[in-house]
Image: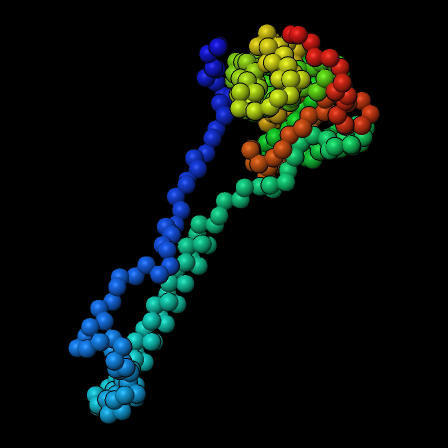
């Protein structure tokens, strides 16, 4: 098996905690000693309540104020006032702390790049063009869709020199639906070029972790993995970061079909991506999946 690449495409996994509350069975209490000066069933209660001793005042009753010379009530009032002042102070402190340290905005969680399912291609092209029309000078994340799939070595030439954040791969096989693989990458052209091999590893991981008897699915994944490792022309798009003037310039480069920008406050990792594939000519919809799968 080939060595896994070490650059930019490793999958990040979170740790899952499995600790849970302990469950105690109901009714598990130590046995009580019922022989307190006699049998427990002799009709005499173990703990006579205050009503059995009318001459004895229960704690917390008004008798305390009489017996301590009236000092109990003022003391309780003073404690209550002090507790109220402390509570108000804590609330004021928390309010000031929240004002000084507001929560960081993570951007809109529903942001997405690319055409919607069943959207007419002509409408998406207009929408993508309009997303570049603003006059701000901020950096924007943007989706670059190609007219034709390109080989990994051609990725830098299709980025306009902008920072690449994600490379999108899909092996084209007529009449066969193959997976779209998105590979996040750090800055640098070398890791972007190497992302094709990383995409192959992602497909292999998915294939090995999937339990299925679908022979067609297994053949499709195997062929896609093999072609990506051979350096096929299978890169269909990029996610880049740049200013709107830079993105407009990129949109005019040969081989670039569309460039769509997100608002400047969009956060990396908090938006979905679905490129405009070269085979989408009229409407964005899956093509047929009934052709034989090639051997390689």
Compared across the picture, whether 250 is left or right of 119 comes to left
Tell me if residue 21 comes above or below residue 286 in the rendering. Answer: below
Count of picture labels: 0
Residue 210 location, quadrant: top right
Name the residue: 59% across, 10% down. 226
Tell me if residue 202 comes above or below residue 57 in the rendering. Answer: above
Name the residue: 25% across, 80% down. 42
Tell me if residue 109 comes above or below residue 34 in the rendering. Answer: above
Name the residue: 37% across, 72% down. 84
Query: Does residue 141 appear in this view?
Result: yes
Compared across the picture, whether 209 is left or right of 276 comes to left
> Which quadrant of the figure contains the C terminus?
top right
Query: Does residue 250 appear in this view?
Result: no
Q: Position of residue 18 (x, y in %)?
A: 41, 41
Q: Position of residue 192 (x, y in %)?
A: 55, 17
Compared across the picture, whether 217 is left or right of 198 comes to right
Q: Position of residue 132 (x, y in %)?
A: 70, 31
Q: Position of residue 26 (x, y in %)?
A: 37, 59
Residue 233 location, quadrant: top right
């Amino acid at each position: 098996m080939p060595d896994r690449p070490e650059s930019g495409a490793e999958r990040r996994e979170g740790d899952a905690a499995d600790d849970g509350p302990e469950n105690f069975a109901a009714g598990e209490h130590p046995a009580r000693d019922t022989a307190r000066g006699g049998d427990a069933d002799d009709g005499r209660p173990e703990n006579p309540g205050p009503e059995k001793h009318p001459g004895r005042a229960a704690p917390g009753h008004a008798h305390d104020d009489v017996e301590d010379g009236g000092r109990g009530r003022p003391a309780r009032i003073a404690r209550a006032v002090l507790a109220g002042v402390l509570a108000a102070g804590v609330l004021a402190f928390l309010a000031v702390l929240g004002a000084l340290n507001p929560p960081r905005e993570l951007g809109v969680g529903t942001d997405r790049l690319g055409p919607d399912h069943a959207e007419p291609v002509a409408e998406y092209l207009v929408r993508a063009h309009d997303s570049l029309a603003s006059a701000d000078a901020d950096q924007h994340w943007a989706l670059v869709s190609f007219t034709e799939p390109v080989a990994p070595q051609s990725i830098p030439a299709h980025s306009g020199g902008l920072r690449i954040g994600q490379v999108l791969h899909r092996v084209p096989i007529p009449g066969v639906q193959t997976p779209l693989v998105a590979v996040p990458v750090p800055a640098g052209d070398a890791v972007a070029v190497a992302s094709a091999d990383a995409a192959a590893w992602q497909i292999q991981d998915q294939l090995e972790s999937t339990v299925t008897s679908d022979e067609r699915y297994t053949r499709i994944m195997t062929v896609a993995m093999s072609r990506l490792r051979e350096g096929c022309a299978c890169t269909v798009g990029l996610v880049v970061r740049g200013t709107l003037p830079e993105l407009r310039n990129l949109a005019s480069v040969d081989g670039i079909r569309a460039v769509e920008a997100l608002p400047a406050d969009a956060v990396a990792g908090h938006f979905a991506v679905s490129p405009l594939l070269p085979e989408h000519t009229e409407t964005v919809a899956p093509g047929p999946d009934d052709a034989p799968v090639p051997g390689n």
